[in-house]
Image: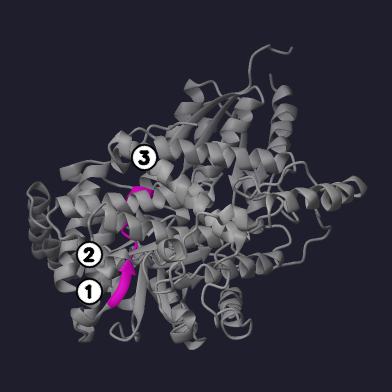
Amino acid sequence: MRVDRKIRVVIAKPGLDGHDRGAKVIARALRDAGMEVIYTGLRQTPEQIATASLQEDADVIGLSILSGAHNHIVPRLMELLRQNGLDDVLVLIGGIIPDVDIPKLKAIGVKGIFLPGTGMQEIVDFINLHVRARV
Amino acid sequence: MADADRERWRRETLEPALKKAPERASTFTTISGRPVDRLYSAENVEGLDYDRDLADPGAFPYTRGIHRSGYRGKLWTMRQFAGFGTPQDTNARYKALLEAGGTGLSVAFDLPTLMGRDPDHELSRGEVGKCGVSVASLADMEALFDGISLGDITTSMTINSPAAMIFAMYLVVAERQGADWETLSGTIQNDILKEFIAQKEYIFPPRPSMRIITDIFAFSLASVPRWNPISVSGYHIREAGATALQELAFTLRDGIEYVDWGVKAGLDVDSFVPRMSFFFNAHSDFFEEIAKYRAARRIWAREMRDRFGARSERSWKLRFHSQTAGVSLTAQQPYNNVVRTALQALSAVLGGTNSLHTNSLDEALALPTEQAATLALRTQQIIAHESGIAEAIDPFGGSFYVETLTNQMEEGARAYFAQIDRMGGMVEAIERGFPQKEIADSSYRFQQALERKEKVVVGVNDFIGTGEPTFETLYLDESASETQIGALERLRKTRDAGEVARALDRLRAAANSVDNVMPPILDAVRAYATVGEMCDALREVWGEYEEVPAI
């Protein structure tokens, strides 16, 4: 059954890095595409992101990571999502992720990894395709 | 050409040609979205007065350069930014860069160091040694410059919130090598305003952050007179999505803000302004960039003379480093990045840069390999020694197009200055989120232009290839983190804990008073207090800044 509500997306920037251009651009693009976007701001711990996702009833979590800290941050977040019963939230990463790390992240449940140069429309389409299956 | 002649040319020559073959687009714009006319000619620069607006190189307002002989006397400094892993890893890279003919060092620190956190802090997990070198204490700084004589090289250090601590560590290493502080030369970035505006590596709120900077100004003036205690940076503002004009305007207005705070702290304008330096981006729109650098020199000279009454020529001369645009590099078809970087470097040289970093072709993917970093340096050497570009000074001076753009840059920057002045200054503008919002809007507009293919990035939204070449990149695992945490544990056991505690108490006391924070920081560094411990002492006094997230 299709629920007629906006797709809710939490955009988060975990880790110590402050380069938020990508996070802000994608947040605006998703909002312009009709989604409800919650931007958490900088330096969010996995715990804060999981809490925000629960409170905001997120359909999607978009993580912006450029610093190389994904191998620490993402497994911890996925574990917290499981503990909070949020396994069905679509988790996406945008940023700089070395090729060798991609299969490891997919194996723990990350559904989409978008590398530099990805168009906004591609991400919008991906979310629409995968979240509609859920709601 | 008279108006009537131009009109006849338009009617009889241009229009028939356009009918046969229309132009590629109805409007043309720079990468910043600024409209570009079909043709620039004498009419565009009618009001330009050579002596007043350009002048010969080395003469006010320095539009054509600050050096009388341009690059004929001395080429720009080829300064390649590098840092990763442990201090030992980076030390080896520095030795390789110096061996390859690099003429200065430039230190990239990792995120924990930049954010004033020790490697064993919870928030440092996964970040140690990843985006730069990990430096937690004097012991790390000693290892970083092991075998490199600090009296003989110049070093630039990209450090902002903990700039005072890192500067102090460098000074103590030099002291222990036997180098006199008076002879040391180099730069600390120490530009907190652009952190609030763009890069967001802030720790303390704006006002105490500005106070540390004026303390550093006063200290370095008295004790390390050849040191540049600030590099006012537009680089990060541009990377965050600003246009060329916004980069120029916000950076120079930041510079004005520092001068203002320095003067209010009791410093004579002509004592510290000559040691201020700048740092700009070298982006892809060739002419717009050249105009930006030329306008920067002219605006700064005029502002220092007219706004602050500076009388020393050295205060009027804007010196700047530049770096090619990291944001323009693509993960797709990475070899194209060599070409992009070469063109960007060319614009910086034609704009009269005093020092230059060229990015490596693999930097959209990872930190550069040694091979890629060497190629980037070679790019500069080819421009310097093969292209002939460095032989004549300001070769675009007098170009109708470049002079028009230079004028437009100055006018646009002055309009932003007026707006920011009305808000009460840059600190107030930042507190209102003004530059942040301007930049976010520009970056979104550019992204939309890419989506609509109004702007083309080769290999990304057009000319997309099939089958990317396999490509070796630098992969940094967690081993640097383990090494650094282990070293820190040993350090904490062997140093004199009482001395560290007393030094940190003196630092807190200075922060609570109006005393300069540099002397107690130097004492704490000598006692092997860590960056995290020193920053924590100041966090206790001043608190931490948190921005209100806005999209």
Residue B260 can be seen, yes or no: yes
Q: Earlier in the sequence, mark 1 or mark 3?
A: 1
For the record, the magenta segment spans B185-194
Identify the residue position indicated by label 2 in the image.
Answer: B311
**Mark pair 3, 2: CA separation:** 23 Å
Image quarter where the N terminus of chain B lies is bottom right
Q: Residues within 10 Å of mark 3 (few under 14, many from 20)?
A: few
Residue drawn at x 12%, y 55% as measured from the top left: B266
The location of residue B85, given as percent across then percent down, is: 45, 68
**Mark pair 1, 3: CA separation:** 40 Å
Tags 1 and 2 touching, CB below 8 Å: no
Output the chain of dot 2.
B
> Mark 1 belongs to which amino acid?
Leu
> Mark 3 belongs to which amino acid?
Ala
* Rendered view: B178 above or below A66: below
Tags 3 and 2 touching, CB below 8 Å: no
* Rendered view: B370 above or below B451: below
Identify the residue position indicated by label 1 in the image.
Answer: B171
